[in-house]
């Protein structure tokens, strides 16, 4: 399981991510003019989308749905608010993504079982696991043994044309 460390501040209470996390997600997972679906709590991703000149449904996502145009990136906190089940949520994500598009799931760090449950549900919906990013507000220092203060796990799933879904 590939793991990457991003040194970014922790989110404020009630929000899915910090401003720095929103910027990193948008810049690392999209290109200019790509469409992003923002299902995260807080304005941080919307700010990053606007600053990076990406496109988003921004105001209409929560009130009218995700739109008909396929997106390059869906970003969500967990658990998803508008789904009957995790698998149904990821089926909707997969249907809303361009091939090669990604879903970024933001999880508060500390629940060992949740990341595995999220990955299993995404696989059952036909998404492939791509990467695990841990966000820490004390970055590792070369030559020093410092314990990271991890606050968020970000699981990246992808819409791979070859992945049709599995049961495990």
Image: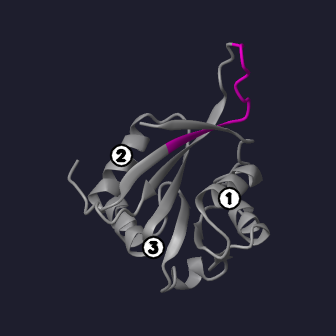
Q: Mark 2 points at which residue?
A: 117
Query: Which residue is rendered at x = 68% and y = 71% of the image?
Result: 32
Q: Does the magenta stretch include residue 35?
A: no
Question: Where does label 1 land, which residue?
Answer: 27
Between the C-alphas of marks 3 and 2, the distance is 24 Å
Magenta-drawn stretch, dominant element (helix, strand or loop): loop
Alpha carbon separation for disc pair 1 and 2: 27 Å
Q: What element carries label 1?
A: helix
Q: Circle 3 sits on which residue?
A: 98
Q: Does 150 sit above or below residue 146?
A: below
**Mark with earlier residue (1, 2):** 1
Up the image or down, 62 lies above or below 4; here it is below
CB under 8 Å between discs 3 and 1: no
Kindly indicate whether the residue at mark 2 contacts the one at mark 1 (C-beta within 8 angstroms).
no
User: Of residues 48 and 65, which is closer to you in this image?
Assistant: 48
User: Does residue 166 appear left or right of residue 37 in this picture?
Assistant: left
Q: Extreme right residue here?
A: 51
Badge 2: residue crowd in 10 Å (few <14, some 14–19, many ≥20): few
Task: Residue at 51% x, 79% y: name it.
Answer: 66
Residue 25, by quadrant, is bottom right
In the displayed structure, would residue 3 be above or below residue 167?
Answer: above
Query: Under tag 3, what secondary structure?
Result: strand
State which tag comes first along the sequence, 3 or 1: 1
Instruction: Tell whether 50 sits left or right of 167.
Output: right
For residue 83, say whether it is visible.
Answer: no
Secondary structure type for disc 2: helix
Whether residue 126 is visible, yes or no, is yes
Question: What segment carries the magenta color?
Answer: 132-144
Coordinates of residue 142 in the picture (x, y in percent): 72, 19
- Which one is closest to the eye, mark 3 or mark 2? 3
Q: Where is residue 47 in the image (x, y as percent from the top left)?
A: 76, 66
């Amino acid at each position: 399981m590939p793991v990457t460390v991003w040194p970014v501040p922790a989110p404020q209470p009630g929000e899915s991510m910090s401003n720095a996390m929103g910027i990193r997600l948008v810049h690392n997972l999209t290109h200019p003019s790509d469409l992003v679906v923002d299902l995260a709590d807080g304005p941080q991703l919307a700010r990053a989308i606007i600053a990076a000149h990406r496109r988003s449904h921004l105001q209409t996502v929560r009130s009218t749905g995700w739109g008909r145009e396929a997106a390059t990136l869906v970003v969500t906190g967990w658990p998803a608010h508008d789904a009957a089940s995790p698998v149904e949520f990821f089926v909707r994500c997969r249907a809303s993504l361009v091939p090669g598009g990604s879903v970024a799931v933001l999880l508060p760090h500390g629940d060992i079982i949740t990341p595995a449950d999220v990955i299993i549900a995404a696989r059952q919906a036909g998404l492939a696991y791509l990467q695990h990013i841990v966000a820490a507000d004390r970055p590792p220092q070369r030559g020093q043994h410092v314990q990271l203060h991890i606050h968020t796990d970000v699981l990246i799933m992808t819409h791979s044309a070859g992945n049709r879904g599995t049961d495990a």
